[in-house]
Image: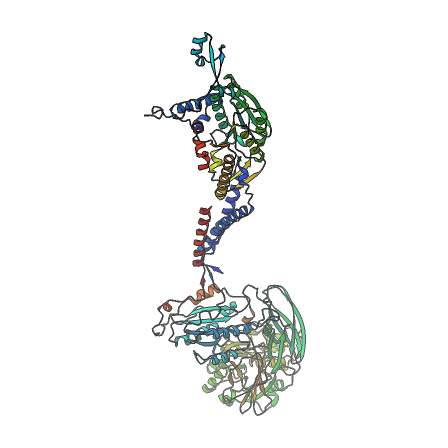
Amino acid sequence: MSAAAKGRPRLLDPRALARIKGLALRSRLVVDGVLQGLHKSPHHGSSIEFAEHKEYTPGDDTRHIDWKAYGRVDKVYVKKFEQETNLRAFTVLDVSASMGYGADGALTKLEYASVLAASLGFLLLRQQDALGLVAFAGQVETALPARARMSHLSHFCANLEATQARGPTRIDVGLRRVVEQARKRGVVHVYSDFFGDDAEAFALLRQLVTRGHQVTVFHTLDGEELDFPFEEMTVFQGMESNQRLLVEPKLVRDAYLERMTTFREGLRRRCLADRVQYVLADTREPPENLLLRYLTGQDAARGGRGGGR
Amino acid sequence: MRFDNPWMLLGTLAAAIPVIIHLINRHRARVRPFAAVEFLLLSDKRLARRLRVRQLLVLALRVLLMLAIPFALAKPYLQDEPAPGVDLAEPGAVVLIVDDSLSMQAVPEAGADSLLQRAVARAQEAVEAGGARTSFAVVAAGLPARLLTPGLTYDRTTLTRALERVVPSARGGDMAGALREAERVLAESHERRRRVIVLSDQAAHAWAGISEPWALADPPAVDLVDVGLPDAPPPPNASVAGVAVRPAPEVGPGQVHVDVTVANHGATERDLPVTVDLAGVVATSSATLPAGRRDHVTSVLGLPGPASGLRGSARLPPDALAADDTWYFTVDFGGEVTVGVVNGSPRNVPYLDELFFVRAALEAPTGDVARIHPIWLTPDDLEPGRIEPLDALILANVGRLTRPQEIAVETFVEQGGGLLVTAGDQLTPESSLSYGPLLPLPIRATKQVGKPGDPATELSLLRFDDLDSEHPVMREFAEVDEVSLLKARTWSYALLDAAQREGVRVLASFTGGQPALVEAPFGRGRLMMLTTTVDRDGSDLCIRSSFLPLLHQLTLYLAGKLDRESGESHRVGEPAIVEIPPGEGALVLERPDGAQVAIPDPAPETKIEVGDIDVVGHYALRRRSGDAAETVFAVNADRAESELARADLVAVAELLRRPGAGVAPPVAEAEDPELSVDAPSSRRTRLWPVVLVALFWLLASEAWLVLRS
């Protein structure tokens, strides 16, 4: 009996996902898995409060027609809910050169983050939330204002696909744009490897949290960056600098892993201190698995998966 | 350091392999873009330095590993100077062979101790390092090899005194004798641990000619100690290798040629000035000699007096080995030659007497190198006691010898005397029987080819022809134009049998080829025959001006004074057999250092063996009675010692491992069974086990470092 037959979501191997062309299709597959997982999940997400009625106009979802009101006033109204009208989600995506790194045959960090962002965007748009995008490197590369239309998703995906990893990492640049645009409370998803100076970035993150935004940091790292599995003598070349380093990997592995762990743990602690949710996005993990953990709150409950590693 | 398998050292080239691999890896290292390169930059410089050091350490260990493997396979060992005392503290018997031959007087560096001083010092160190149960003996290896201690002894004072007696000498080397002496001494020991330490310059000549160093089948262990500078080339050395003096009548009376043989034993060409001093007459000449060559330098000197017992020397400027720069020689062409002349046909009329012209010739004073003293005898005087003191004997027309006379004359000639037989009417073919082997060739017939003063036979008369100008007797006539000897006419002569006799030499022939003057060796002496007369009965030779010098030359030649090159010498360390000076009474030997040694008179012997010759120079043997007559002889060092090139010690060590054929005497049971194992013939410290241990540790260290990485 297969896992699907048992009702468990069929997880997509990121390497298999990498062979699928097109972000929309990738995210759709991921979302399918997520929805399947959510259906089985005992957690049904946050409740949505009723806000007001709106006279029906073509294009409104017929599922939200208030048939009782129609019976009383003989006019067709549709229900409007509180979140639906107020939630604005911003995807802040790091497209610096370091995000272009990926193990052979696997998704790059940028591709992986894009899949996550597109999948979450689909889910948000599906529940009438507005979705915006800020892609940054040394500067803001792409900025899409938040829109709640489902057709906005294709625009969203097209922008993500057209983005190339290049330039330095300036997280503060991307966050500052969000701070300027996101006046109302909403959701901010930050996808980055945080290989840059993040002192000002955390100030901006705190500012967003203070405004009532639900901020989540997807710390996107490749599996090779996490485990440093190299064996042969290698010349490592920086992706955001011209630094070259001839290294016998066996000799430096311990020191590297120690520094990497310190870095991740430090980032996680700062996130927790600033009430920012920290999610380690390991590109070897199936994206729907990661999203399920995120959406069902498992990651928040454990303080982020990365903290346990 | 030496190696059993030196060719294995080629494997050390493999030490380049780790370095090459490292360099190749650097080139082949894959370039990989990496986002987290900042984490690799290792801002912690201490860690970076540590890692770099570790990398270099691993590389160094791998290089050392690759070096150590062939190094160990090459089986290195140390065979150096044995550092006497290292194992001498163990109970055992040790013979110290100290080479005191001439070459040990060499000084390897200016101002440094001589090799002999170094050898004695090393021997003293060995004695001091010896344990209380180590017995020593000291053997000097100069010719002849001498045991300087009363066998093996534990008494350090005795040993020190023995070593103090090892002084510079001009002796030759007698390493073979020294080894045999050491073996003999050790054979008397009951110790299982028996050792010989050879302290020498290890010159090649010291070991030359030794093929069977041991007599017994159980040779002792040998340490070869080179007291020179093993890594330095031999010091430059030149020597006077010999002197020969011969008369130079062609130059003038009393003149001699002095041929000095000089040798350059060094590695570079040298100009060698040679100074010859012959009884105060000095001549200087020079020679330019390439490396390793020898040559003759000839000087002509006038004799300052009679050529008897003159002392001379040939010198070179002093060099690293000064002891071989002087050669001592004597010039002795006889002084006085006593010749007995037997008249076989005496006449009452003096001018008709057989010896009329001979007497005149032999009694005439001349400028010869030796004075001739004739003694006039009759055939009846041919007795052993009468003719034994003579140097030469002339039998003039003696027709027959009795058997005792023949034996007496034979004995005289066999012992070195000279005999001249001249023909005449008494000497017939029948005489050959009574002469036995005393005639160079038997007489076949007597011939009469004419009469003196008869014009009819004038053309039939014979003349001397075809002189052997190379012969010492004829050499004086060789350069004289129209020599009167060739004008002498002969009308009666003895025709000799042409039968072959070994060593016969014809000095002169008559026209027609008949022998006129013939020589043959006999024992240590020589026989000559003039086939015509020495009076006017058969020839007018006796009235020719050549007669006198011819007779003098014949007499000197028969006495052995003419063809002998003077200047000969004896070798240090070997007994010299010399003639006893005339007179009576005890003998005294005066040594070069002025010391006088009394020697009993061995009368009636005419020669004596003189031992105790241990220094170079002139020795004089004379009567204690104060008689002026003396026998002077020169003693020089063996010039084989002048060659300072070193022997191949590996080959020498191999030679010394060769056991003899004799059976070793039984030895008491050893306390320590390990000592029964054959000891190596020279000290060897094997290094390869140490290298193997080091190899293991290198391997372990490398593995630990790699695993730790």
Q: Residue furthest left?
A: A1
Q: Position of residue B107 (x, y in %)?
A: 58, 71
Q: Nearer the viewer, residue B30 or B424?
A: B30
Q: Nearer the viewer, residue B17 or B620?
A: B17
To which quarter of the image does residue A141 belong? top right
Q: Position of residue B192 (x, y in %)?
A: 38, 72
Q: Position of residue A158 (x, y in %)?
A: 53, 20
Q: Residue furthest front?
A: A72
Q: Nearer the viewer, residue B463 or A304?
A: A304
- Tell me the colour scheme of the image: rainbow
Q: Residue at x 56, y 22 (%)?
A: A144
Q: With B278 as the anchor, is A147 left or right in this view? A: left
Residue B696, can we see it?
Answer: yes
**Image height of B653 relative to A171, above or below:** below
**Image height of B517 relative to A57, above or below:** below
Residue B638, can we see it?
Answer: no
Q: Position of residue B611 (x, y in %)?
A: 51, 82
Number of residue marks = 0
**Image height of B258 relative to B62, above or below:** below
Q: Nearer the viewer, residue A290 or B174?
A: A290
Q: Residue furthest top?
A: A74
**Image height of B69 relative to B641, above or below:** above
